[in-house]
Amino acid sequence: MNFLPPSYIPCEACRGKRFNPQTLAVQYNGKSIGDLLELTIEEAAEFFSSQPRIHKALELLVQTGLGYLQLGQPSPTLSGGEAQRLKLVSELKTGVARGITDRLRKNITPKSTLYLLEEPTIGLHMADVELLIEVLHRLVDEGNTVIVIEHNLDVIAEADYVLDIGPEAGEAGGEVVVAGPPEEIAQHQDSRTAPVSPENASGRKGSAWGRSGVGLTA
Ligand SMILES: [Zn+2]
């Protein structure tokens, strides 16, 4: 049985603007809400640069490598990685707010949250992987624990502790091959991760192995 792929056509009544003419007549700096939803997050951050509350949230999204998304992009069209990064940003936003409140009432120990992420780097450009790593470090610096199931070596290299699960994929896997800090994984004979790890790759020796964060490889 064959299914046709989903297809989208703009609504005839509003031509994709999603609002009625009365609503669209209201403008902010020359743009209606319909125009705003067509901006990318990066453009919107610029547009709202004089509105700290809006700007701050958009800027965090840009820092997470999501600046290219359209503000009005429907959520079912987001990739898994994009959806995870969106959630991370909302966590960071509450984290920042919580940090300030905690500083105000010094006696209260901040709550620690466990974040479990599955391959958040999927579909990410190299430069954006770095941004994501920054975000993960920020979560850890705020006292949270981050567990990442990941194949991306740059992310694995940033972990405090790595569980290398294998030795192969699927039925030939499922065993813990080696566990320890990234430096130890890189030395291990049977690990599939070791030979290609940044520690062993030429020209990359001494990269940022073993900074804060917890990683898992699978
Ligand atoms: Zn419509």
Image (cartoon, rainbow, N blue to C red):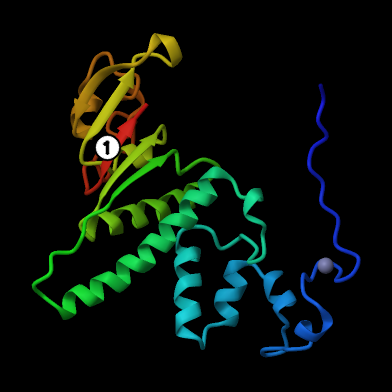
Residue at left offset 73%, top offset 76%? 35
Is residue 197 shown left or right of residue 44?
A: left
Residue displayed at 72% across by 88% down: 27
> What residue occupies the far right of the structure in this picture?
12
Q: Quadrant of residue 93?
A: bottom left
Q: Is residue 94 left or right of residue 5?
A: left
Query: Could you say which quadrant of the image residue 95 lies in?
Result: bottom left
On the rendered structure, is 79 left or right of 211? right
User: How many residues crowd mark 1 within 10 Å: few (<14), some (14–19), many (20+)?
Assistant: few
Residue 80, x across and y down, in percent: 54, 43
Residue 59: where, in percent of width, then height?
47, 71
Q: Quadrant of residue 186?
A: top left
Q: Quadrant of the C terminus?
A: top left
Say if 137 sits above or below 117 in the image. Answer: below
Determine which residue is flagged by label 1. 205
Query: In front here: 9 or 176?
Result: 9
Left or right of 135 on screen, residue 83: right
Q: Nearer the viewer, residue 31 or 154?
A: 31
Q: Amino acid at mark 1?
A: Lys
Element assignment for label 1? loop
